[in-house]
């Protein structure tokens, strides 16, 4: 898939079908973009599971923080990645071990890794890169 541009219907289809999201790199710092996006997605009715090993067991916006995807209490529809592009291949390794697989892997603004995206897509996972679900939802 061409990840330079996305059809509005593709993005809308994802955001309308997703109910549960794991946010990798969620921050309890209320000036960080991941905090704003987490708050926004919760307000829009999504069930969001923050992932941040440095804050595991604590809460962000009333949601328990998990150390890794493997620690999640239930399957999720989407993985939202707030990490550097260089971290994406390792995250995709973790994603591909989940059962069931999520429907979507989404990387935030400035985050892109085409090889990792191709691996996720080969497993049947939709991928959106270098976009923000908060902005796209609006």
Image (cartoon, helix red, strand yellow):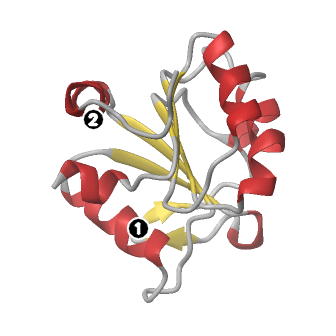
Q: Position of residue 38 (x, y in %)?
A: 39, 63
Left or right: 82, with 103 as reference point: right
At x 66% / y 11%, what residue is drawn?
123
Q: CA distance from mark 2 to mark 1?
A: 23 Å
Left or right: 82, with 138 as reference point: right
Q: Secondary structure at mark 2?
A: helix
At x 43% / y 86%, what residue is drawn?
30
Residue 40 lies in what quarter of the image?
bottom left
Q: Nearer the viewer, residue 133 or 101?
A: 133
Which residue is label 1 attached to? Answer: 62
Residue 16: assigned label: none
Q: Secondary structure at mark 1?
A: loop
Q: Position of residue 1 (x, y in %)?
A: 52, 21
Which residue is label 2 attached to? Answer: 15
Mark before the other along the chain sequence, 2 or 1: 2
Q: Is residue 9 visible?
A: yes
């Amino acid at each position: 898939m061409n990840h330079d541009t996305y059809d509005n219907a593709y993005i809308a289809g994802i955001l309308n079908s997703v109910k549960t999201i794991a946010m990798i790199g969620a921050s309890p710092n209320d000036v960080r973009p991941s905090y704003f996006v987490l708050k926004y997605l919760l307000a829009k009715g999504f069930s969001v599971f923050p992932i941040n090993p440095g804050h595991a067991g604590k809460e962000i916006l009333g949601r328990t923080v998990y150390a890794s995807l493997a620690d999640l209490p239930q399957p999720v529809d989407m993985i939202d990645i707030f990490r550097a592009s260089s971290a994406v291949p390792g995250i995709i390794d973790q994603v591909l071990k989940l059962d069931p697989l999520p429907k979507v892997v989404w990387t935030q603004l400035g985050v892109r890794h085409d090889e990792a995206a191709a691996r996720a897509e080969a497993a049947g996972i939709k991928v959106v890169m270098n976009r923000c679900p908060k902005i796209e939802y609006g």
